[in-house]
């Protein structure tokens, strides 16, 4: 079976073609211009993950939303569930950069943290 991937590990965005045997093992891999491509494909086949970024609401702040992100990539199949969980979170200003918004998100062991400080409203 043949599968195609566009690598997202570096800015080159290599188009990688893999051939898999009947057990899902890679028998051939072409199109990668660096060592990150094969690593990316192996990860995608066994446990696809994504760094997730979004915003959460802030009450009483100089801005109504604060950007947040996962400290580490989360399982790809948890991204939508995580988005729904974060939609219900409201922070109270002031908010500090690196503040934990959701600890151990969805039982993954990965925290969601703020990536910007938000001062109290003026």
Image: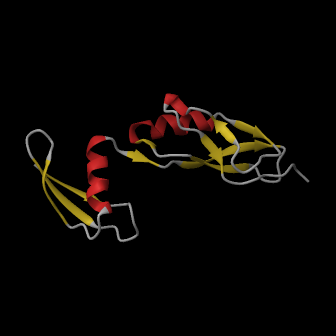
* Residue 47 shown left or right of residue 92 in the figure: left
* Residue 92 shown left or right of residue 66 in the figure: right
- For image coordinates 40% across by 45% down, the residue present is 49
* Residue 18 shown left or right of residue 58 in the figure: left
Residue sitting at the far top: 107
Q: In the rendered view, tell whether residue 56 sits above or below residue 102.
A: below
Residue sitting at the far right: 122
The spot of residue 18 in percent (x, y) is 16, 56
Q: In the rendered view, tell whether residue 103 sits above or below residue 2.
A: above
Quarter of the figure with the C terminus: bottom right
The spot of residue 88 in percent (x, y) is 64, 33
- For image coordinates 64% across by 44% down, the residue present is 113
Is 11 in front, or is 62?
11
Q: Quadrant of residue 77?
A: top left
Residue sitting at the far front: 35
- For image coordinates 53% across by 37% down, the residue present is 110
* Residue 62 shown left or right of residue 105 in the figure: right
The spot of residue 35 in percent (x, y) is 29, 64
Number of marks present in the image shown: 0
Q: How is the image coloured?
A: secondary structure
- For image coordinates 29% across by 68% down, the residue present is 34
Q: Quadrant of residue 21?
A: top left
Is 66 in front, or is 8?
8
């Amino acid at each position: 079976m043949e599968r195609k991937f566009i690598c997202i590990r570096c800015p080159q965005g290599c188009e990688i073609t893999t051939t898999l045997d009947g057990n899902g093992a890679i028998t051939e891999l072409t199109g990668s211009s660096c060592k990150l491509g094969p690593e990316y494909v192996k990860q995608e086949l066994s446990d696809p993950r994504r760094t997730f970024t979004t915003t959460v609401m802030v009450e009483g702040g100089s801005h109504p939303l604060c950007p947040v992100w996962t400290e580490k990539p989360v399982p790809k199949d948890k991204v939508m569930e995580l988005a729904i969980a974060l939609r219900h979170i409201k922070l109270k200003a002031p908010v500090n950069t690196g503040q934990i918004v959701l600890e151990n998100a969805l039982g993954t062991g990965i925290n969601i943290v703020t990536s910007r400080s938000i001062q109290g409203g003026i």
